[in-house]
Image (cartoon, rainbow, N blue to C red):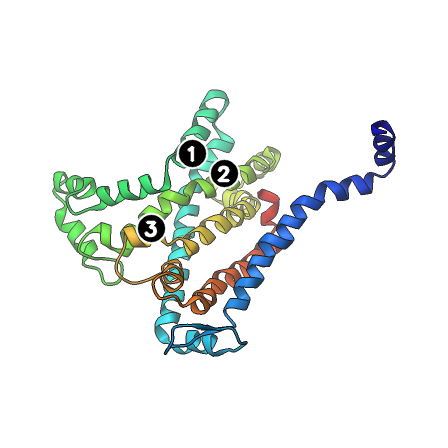
Amino acid sequence: MGAAIGRSLWRRSGLVTFLLLLPPMLWLGVVYTGSLFALLAQSLFALDEFSGVILYEPTLSTWRQFLSEPSNLDIVLRTLVMAACVTIACAVVAFPIAYLMARYAQGRWKALLYVLVMLPLWSSYLVKVYAWKLILAKEGAITWIFGQMGLPWLLDGILAIPLIGGPSLSVSYLGMFLVFTYLWVPFMILPVEAALERVPRRLLEASGDLGAPPGMTFRKIILPLAFPGVVAGSIFTFSLTMGDYILPYVIGSSRLFIGQVVYLQQGTAGNVPLAAAFSVVPIVVMAIYLAVARRLGAFDAL
C-alpha cells in the first residue's frame, strides 16, 4: 500500500509540491494574513466614550479621530524619522565591516568576524537595553569617559541641543538612537556582506586596469552592486525600529512612539480600535517599503 502511494506521488510531482506547501500556506493565509485583516477590521469600529464599550458597527470615526488629532500625526512622524535615522546610521556602520568581511577576511578571521557580529544577538534583548541604560546614565560609563578626557562640556553641549538632548543620554532621543543602532546593526551587516560577496572581483580588477581611482571604483561599481544588500538590511532595521515599544519606555523622553501608543491604547485605555488604527500605519508603510525594495532587487540579497 505504501509503495503504491509512493509511486503514485512520484509520478505527480505537482501534487507532492502542493501537499508540502499546504501547511505553511495555510498558516500564512489563515493565521498571519487573517490576523492582519482582523486588525484592519478592528480599526473600523469605535469606542463609546461614555460607557467605554466597543461598538461593533462599521464606522470611520476612529480613523477621523486618528487623522484629526495633530498629536497622533506627530507620533507617526517621530517614529518614522527615528526609524529612518537608525537605518542610515546602521548602513554607515555596517558597510565598512561588511566590506572587510567580504574582501579581506579569510578562514578563521572571517569566522571570528561572523561570531563577533552575531554575538550580540545571543544575549537577551532586555539585558542589552537595561545595560545600555546604565551606560548612558548621568553616572554611567560614557559620562565618566568624557570626564576623564576633560570634555564634560562637550557632552553637556550635546545634551543641550533641542530635540535630541535631555537631562542625560539615558533620557534623550540621542541615547535611544544609539541603542537602536547597536541593536539592529547586525541585521544590516549580514545582507550587505552577502551582496558584497557576489561582486565579481574581475570587475574591480578591470576598473583598476582602466585607471579608475579607488573612489571612482567604489562609487561606480561597489556601491551600486551592494545597494540591494543595503536595502535588504534596511527592511529589518526600519521595521524593527518602527515597531519597538520596549526601548522607548526604558530609554528616551516622555514623548510616545507608535509601539508605545498601541500598547497603551489596547491595555490601559482599552481603546482597541484606535490601537488597531495605529497598528495599520506600520503595515502600510512597510508594504510600500517592500514594494520599492523589490523593484530595487533587495530580495536577491536576503
Give SS at disc 1: helix
Query: What distance separates the C-alpha of mark 3 from that of mark 1?
Result: 21 Å
Name the residue carrying label 2. 190
Q: Give the residue at the far top of this rendering.
A: 108
| Callout count | 3
Q: For the point 20% across and 55% down, which residue is it?
A: 159
Position of 129 with respect to 145 (left or right) is right
Q: Is residue 179 left or right of residue 19?
A: left
Question: Tag 2 or tag 3, which sits nearer the N-term?
Answer: 2
| Amino acid type assigned to the residue bearing label 3 in the image | Leu
Quadrant housing residue 8: top right
Q: Are marks 2 and 1 in contact (CB under 8 Å)?
A: yes
Q: Nearer the viewer, residue 49 or 151?
A: 49
Q: Which residue is mark 1?
A: 117
Q: Identify the residue at horizontal 39%, vertical 52% (top origin).
A: 86
**Looking at the rendered structure, which numbered label has been put on residue 62?**
none
Going 19% across and 39% down the picture, which residue do you hit?
Answer: 141
Callout 3 touching callout 1 (CB < 8 Å): no
Quadrant assignment for the C terminus: top right
Relative vertical location of residue 191 with respect to residue 282 in this rendering, above or below: above
Percent position of residue 73, x then y: 39, 71
220 vs 206: above or below: below
Q: Position of residue 299 (x, y in %)?
A: 60, 47
Residue that label 3 marks: 247
Badge 2 crowding class, 10 Å Cα cut-off, few under 14, some 14 to 19, many 20 or more, is: many
Name which residue type carries label 2.
Leu
